[in-house]
Image (cartoon, grey):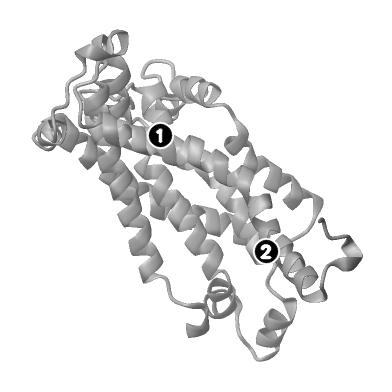
Amino acid sequence: MALTTSAIPPRMKKRRSVTSAGATPYLFLSPAMLLLCAFGLLPILVAAFVSFTDLNIKGLANWSNVQFIGIDNYTTLFTDAAFWSAMGNTAIFVVFGVPVIIGVSLAVALMLNYSQTRFFRFLRAFYFIPAITAIVAVALIWGYLYNTQFGLLNYLLSLVNIPPLQWLSDPTLAKFSVALVAVWRATGLNIIIFLAALQGIPRDYLEAAELDGANSWKRITRIILPLMRFAIFFVTVTTVISWLQFFDEPFVLTEGGPLGATTSISLFLFLEGFRLNQFGYASAGSLVLFVIIIVATLVQLKLRKADDEY
C-alpha cells in the first residue's frame, strides 16, 4: 500500500529533503562535466590509445591496417631531431614571451588605472582590440609590416640609415618577429584581468599609505602587487600554457620556417598529424606535450605562496 504525504514519518521526510538537496549541485554540474568528458577527457584517452598504434591515412580507410606497435612512436619521437628542435623553439618562446607579456600587461594596467577620464577609458578599449582581432587579419597586417622591400619597419630603419632586415627570413630574427606578434595579441586580455584586480583593491589601503608618507613606488611594491598576487598567478599559469601550445602566429606567418626556426611543438605535431598523416606518431607527441603542461602547472601551483603568508 502506497504511503500518502501526510503518512510519511518526519524522519523520512527530512532524509528525502537532505538527499534531494545533496543531489542538486551534481545536477547543475552534470552538463559541464559531460562536456568536459566529451571534449576534454575523451580526446586525451583516444590520443593515448592511438599513440600505441601506427595509425595513418591507410588505417583510417581500413582499420585492419592499424597495428599495435607498443612504445615505438615514443622511441622514435625522442630520437627525432625535428622534435627536439621544436621543443627548443618552444622553450625559447616561453622564456621570452611569458615575462614580457606579464610585465607589459601589468605596466599598462597600472597606467590605465591611474585615471578614470574618457581618454583612459578609450585606451582600455584600444589595448583590448588585438585580443579580439582575427589571426588572419593580424597575419595580413604584420606580414605587410615585416615585408622586406615595402614594409613599414624597414622603411623606418632606412630613415636612420640602417639596412633592411629579413624579419621573417632570418632564422634568428624570425623567432623574435613571430613572438612579437604573439605578445601584441596576448597583452589585451591580460591588461583587462589586471585592471579588474587593480580596481578591486580597497582605496583605504592606498590612502592610508599615502598619509604615512609612502611614495608611488612603495605603494605599488608594498600594497598593490601583493594584493594582486592571485591575478598575477592566474595570468602566469594561463600564459605559460598558451605559450607551450604556441601555434597560430608561426603557422600563419612562417609555417614554421625558415628551416624550422619558428616551428613550435604544437606546429610540429600538426604537421606530423595532418600534413604527413602520421596520426599515431602525432598522438604520442601530443601526450608528451600534455604531460609537460601538467608538470609546468603543478610546479607553479607548488611554488605559489598561500594567501596567509602575506
Residue mark closest to the camera, 1 vs 2: 2
Quarter of the view holding residue 160: top left
Give the residue displayed 52% in from the left and 42% down from the top: 36
What residue is drawn where x is 58% and y is 38%? 131
Q: Is residue 73 left or right of residue 240?
A: left
Type of the residue with mark 1: Pro
Q: Secondary structure at mark 1?
A: helix
Ranked by sequence position, the earlier of labels 1 and 2 is 2
Residue denoted by label 2: 22
Q: Residues within 10 Å of mark 1 (few under 14, many from 20)?
A: few
| Residue located 38% across and 43% down the image | 243
- On the question of residue 290 being in view, the answer is yes
Give coordinates of residue 228: x percent, y percent: 57, 69
Please identify the quadrant where the N terminus is shown. bottom right
Give the spatial CA distance, label 1 vs label 2. 31 Å
Q: Is residue 136 above or below residue 103?
A: above
Q: In the picture provided, is 130 more to the left or to the right than 11?
A: left
Image location of residue 205, percent across then percent down: 68, 82
Which sits in the foreground, 305 or 12? 12
Q: Is residue 113 above or below residue 151?
A: below
Q: Which residue is mark 1?
A: 43
Q: Is residue 246 left or right of residue 7?
A: left
Quadrant of residue 58 within the rendered picture: top left
Count neighbours of disc 2 (C-alpha within 10 A) and say few if under 14, some if 14 to 19, many if 20 or more: few
Please tell me which residue is depicted at 64% across the width and 64% down the height of the picture: 197
Instruction: Reply above or below: 224 against 298.
Output: below
- Look at label 2 and name its amino acid: Gly
Q: Nearer the viewer, residue 123 or 310?
A: 310
Viewer-closest of 85 and 22: 22
> In the image as oriented, which residue stretches furthest toward the front?
1
User: Depth check: 123 or 73 in front?
Assistant: 73
